[in-house]
């Protein structure tokens, strides 16, 4: 039985390990858990979610991440299947119960019978072995040094995590349950309005609040998709009102009008025991988070179950060292997967793990690697990490990286639908070849 090493038990590593183990390979899955944890991880199970419990939109025809998830369902993604099984209400988004999600992924991995679980801080890998490096953005120092050595270029940026509050500490007399513009009618979000005077006071306190110190680097770079709310606010007084505090479409039943600004809270679990402050990734000190965020009337007595933190995320210069199948150009059976490759987001990371595993299997079976092009989201991301660019930056799933449809239309919704239909047709054809 052929042996494959997978380094990292996050989403990408779990997806890759499961795919290969269910195809008869002996997999050695390396992770520092449960003997040690990164600053952002706490759950001993594999596939732990950190920044959010949301895997973004489930809208297949109007959102690229929703389309990507459907492509992965067709290709047999274990992680997306588990997400569907452990989902909690979140409007059009696919949000999950974090604990149930990680537990089920771990059960699936153990259930294959072909995976050996090794808790070890891997310092290097043998480049002649069959390996998938899926250590994630929080790769340990020893392995980071090794990766920097074999890739030649190392990049980094900072990522921020939003706070979580106890559901029973929210003052619902100062909040209302509604989805934006009544999109779903299910009321999966708790909306916390604030008037103009309250908002301006909150804004002043937010931009002057004390931030936690970052010791590793002086020149802090922040990925736009997880920008700390205080950094965003510093761009201008009304920036948040067009971002995470956007009131549009949220009619306060007490006034019959949209509020001046509005924070949204999203369930972290089915029972509503925990709520995430949507878009409020932050690097404020814990005391300042409680003081400033509690200025919203609905949160004046909020109990913070988890405070926001910032942590280092690392990624490699993939176009320089990787092929579009996620293998190294100089070492064809050494693959990278996950956010370390420069795909940004839970679903995107998982997709890269699936592509890496599929192509590892094909190479070891003497088959041609899977031919993916930008007509699908999974293909577009694969091509993105291998396409030379002067300033390589992390990329989320989006319709902009897909090949043009070739049909002129001014209707954006219709254009997205055509792109999605083409992508799904192509993915079904690809599935048949597997």
Image (spheres, rainbow, N blue to C red):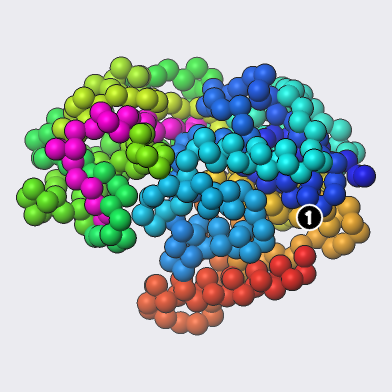
Residue found 86% across the figure and 55% down from its top? 363
Residue 354 in the image: above or below residue 197: below
Residue 306 falls in which quadrant of the image? top left
Relative horizontal placement of residue 256, taking residue 269 as reference (left or right): left
Q: How many marks?
A: 1
Residue found 63% across the figure and 34% down from its top? 46
Residue 107 is situated, as x and y percent measured from the top left of the image, at 66, 39
Q: Is residue 173 magenta?
A: yes
Residue 371 in the image: above or below residue 278: below
Residue 369 in the image: above or below residue 332: below
In the rendered image, is residue 231 in sight?
Answer: no
Relative horizontal placement of residue 144, taking residue 332 as reference (left or right): left
Residue 99 is situated, as x and y percent measured from the top left of the image, at 52, 35
Q: Is residue 314 magenta?
A: no
The quarter of the picture where the N terminus appears is top right
Residue found 59% across the figure and 53% down from its top? 81
Residue 207 is situated, as x and y percent measured from the top left of the image, at 26, 28
Depth order, front residue of 251/400: 251
Residue 12 falls in which quadrant of the image? top right
The quarter of the picture where the C terminus appears is bottom right
Q: Which residue is mark 1?
A: 359
Which region shows up in magenta?
A: 158-180
Depth order, front residue of 104/2: 104
Mark 1 surroundings: few (<14), some (14-19) or many (≥20) residues within 10 A = many
Task: Report helix, strand or loop for mark 1.
Answer: helix
In the rendered image, is residue 55 in sight?
Answer: yes
Residue found 11% across the figure and 40% down from its top? 195
């Amino acid at each position: 039985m052929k042996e494959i090493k997978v380094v990292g038990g996050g989403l990408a590593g779990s997806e890759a390990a499961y795919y290969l183990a269910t195809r008869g390979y002996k997999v050695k899955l390396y992770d520092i858990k449960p003997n040690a944890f990164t600053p952002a991880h706490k759950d001993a199970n594999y596939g732990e979610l950190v920044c959010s419990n949301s895997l973004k939109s489930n809208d297949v025809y109007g959102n690229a991440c929703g389309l990507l998830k459907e492509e992965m369902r067709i290709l047999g993604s274990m992680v997306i299947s588990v997400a569907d099984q452990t989902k909690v209400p979140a409007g059009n988004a696919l949000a999950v119960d974090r604990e149930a999600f990680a537990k089920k992924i771990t059960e699936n991995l153990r259930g294959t019978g072909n995976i050996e679980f090794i808790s070890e801080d891997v310092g290097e890998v043998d480049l002649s072995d069959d390996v998938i490096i899926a250590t994630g953005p929080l790769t340990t120092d020893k392995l980071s040094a090794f990766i920097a050595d074999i890739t030649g270029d190392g990049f980094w940026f900072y990522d921020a995590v939003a706070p979580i509050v106890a559901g029973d500490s929210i003052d619902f007399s100062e909040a209302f349950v509604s989805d934006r513009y009544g999109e779903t009618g299910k009321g999966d979000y708790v909306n916390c309005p604030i008037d103009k005077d309250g908002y301006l006071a909150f804004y002043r306190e937010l931009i002057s609040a004390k931030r936690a110190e970052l010791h590793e680097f002086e020149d802090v770079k922040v990925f736009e998709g997880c920008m700390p709310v205080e950094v965003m606010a510093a761009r201008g007084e009304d920036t948040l009102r067009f971002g995470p505090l956007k009131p549009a479409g949220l009619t306060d039943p007490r006034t019959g009008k949209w509020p001046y600004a509005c924070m949204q809270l999203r369930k972290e679990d089915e029972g509503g025991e925990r709520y995430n402050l949507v878009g409020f990734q932050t690097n404020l000190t814990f005391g300042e988070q409680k003081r400033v965020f509690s200025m919203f009337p609905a949160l004046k007595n909020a109990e913070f179950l988890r405070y926001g933190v910032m942590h280092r995320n690392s990624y490699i210069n993939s176009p320089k060292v990787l092929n579009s199948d996620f293998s190294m150009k100089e070492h064809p059976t050494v693959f990278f997967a996950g956010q370390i490759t420069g795909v940004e987001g839970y679903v995107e990371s998982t997709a890269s793990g699936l592509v890496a595993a599929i192509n590892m299997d094909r190479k070891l079976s003497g088959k041609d690697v899977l031919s993916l092009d930008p007509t699908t989201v999974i293909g577009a991301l694969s091509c993105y990490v291998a396409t030379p660019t002067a300033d390589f930056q992390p990329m989320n799933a989006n319709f902009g990286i897909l090949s043009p449809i070739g049909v002129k239309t001014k209707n954006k919704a219709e254009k997205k639908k055509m792109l999605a239909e083409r992508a799904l047709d192509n993915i079904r054809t690809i599935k048949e070849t597997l």
